[in-house]
Image: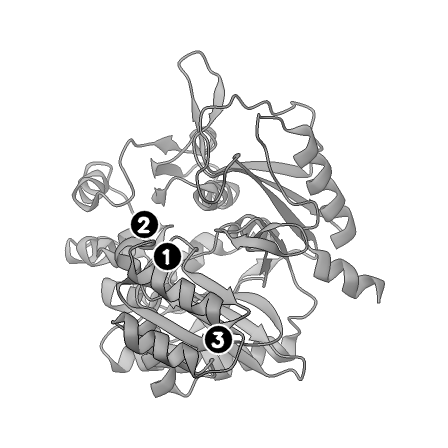
Amino acid sequence: MKLLVVGGGGREHAICAALRREGPDAAIFCAPGNPGTASLATNLPIPADAIDQIAAAVRHHAIDLTIVGPEQPLALGLADRLEAEGHRVFGPTAAAARIEASKAFAKDVMAAAGVPTASSRTFTDLDPALAWVAAHAEPLVVKASGLAAGKGAVVCATRAEAADAVQAMFSGSLGAAGDEVLVESFLEGEELSVFAICNGTDLVLLPSAQDHKRIFEGDRGPNTGGMGAYAPVALATEELLDRARREVLLPTLAELSRRGAPFRGILYAGLMIAPNGSLSVVEFNCRLGDPETQVVLPLLAGGFTAACAAAAAGTTLPTLRTTRDAAVTTVLAARGYPETPEKGAAISIPDDLDRRVTVYHAGTRTDADGTLRVNGGRVLTVTAVASSFAEAQRLSREAAELIQFEGKQYRRDIGWREAARLRA
């Protein structure tokens, strides 16, 4: 089987690793890939959003299935292009990808489908948004409607902070993503990442995960694309996941189909679980999360490749097999991340890390002499898989300490909520 993974981050490295585990003899390509994927696949020097070049590569290499990692190529219509040329692709069409590409569209879909979510208003002009903020209770959440690389949501403790966030977005701080802005009521509770492989009408669930968005320990500082994650999450009981399936995922799939945009790919629901057990959707994504992929896929014992192929074909989804292990990943970020990450520092990864630890490359490059260097904001994700959460947490943290590059920053408290649950 010939497989192409589109993207070049830690998520795509983890996808390539999962495909290779299930298909030792498969021909795997990755566009553009990174130094980590190069050990598992043939890297193709094609940007993830270069639709014409990717389509040409699919034809040239006779790819059987293309798996799209990032949201941008999906929003640009990569799946539409490949499907129109008769190729199988795991990832939604541009119309279905609007569930992430436009938060305003996602809110409209949820309202029509009866999916629980925070009350909100959408604005395209500054003054009405500021007037709405001034008249509503604190705290508030301000979101850019468009794609903002995981940095488009600002939790504001006061109306003054919300007004500042609105003004910044309309002033172009997030580019075109902030041309349309949502202001939401604040949801109390604990967040949970739920991932569903969908064939347009039905779904199978991957293990649940919990991400850590804030840059500093204790969930302080600005939002990032994600500083670490763990899976599975004790909060995600079978009963809660069944409710998420019935109350959130299946109604959303049905509404998208009703609108002529059946969803085939990964539908991510970021849920807020309130203290009373009720659930609400914080956001939808049209792809696997990063860094959640790096803890979710290592817990699969089989079935991922077959499920992706079935979803792409719109046929019956197979059962996913999971282990009983736990996984924790710690993101190593560059100095200055998330605002102005510094690139170029040399990276040293010890050869004798614990065998239960995998280092996924995210923002790295290799010099001609073989020196590995920082090439992005999130540089590496250090994933440990162990029989217990506590052991996986310890292994990930200790390995993160051993890897060296100038300016390295990371959180040492990934999974702190789970650790507190276990101590209670």
Residues 20 and 197: in front is 197
Residues 147 and 247: in front is 147
User: In screen coordinates, is 272 left or right of 417?
Assistant: left
For mark 3, what is the residue? 281
Total count of labels: 3
Q: What is the x, y in percent for residue 257?
A: 28, 78
Q: CA distance from mark 1 to mark 3?
A: 28 Å
- Would residue 200 be seen by someone viewing this image from the given angle? no
Q: Quadrant of residue 90?
A: bottom left
Residues 336 and 26: in front is 336
For mark 1, what is the residue? 309
Between disc 1 and disc 3, the foreground one is 3
Q: CA distance from mark 2 to mark 1?
A: 7 Å
Residues 44 and 339: in front is 339
Q: State yes or no: discs 2 and 1 in contact (Cβ < 8 Å).
A: yes
Amino acid type for the residue under numbered disc 1:
Ala
Q: Quadrant of residue 106?
A: bottom left
For mark 2, what is the residue? 65
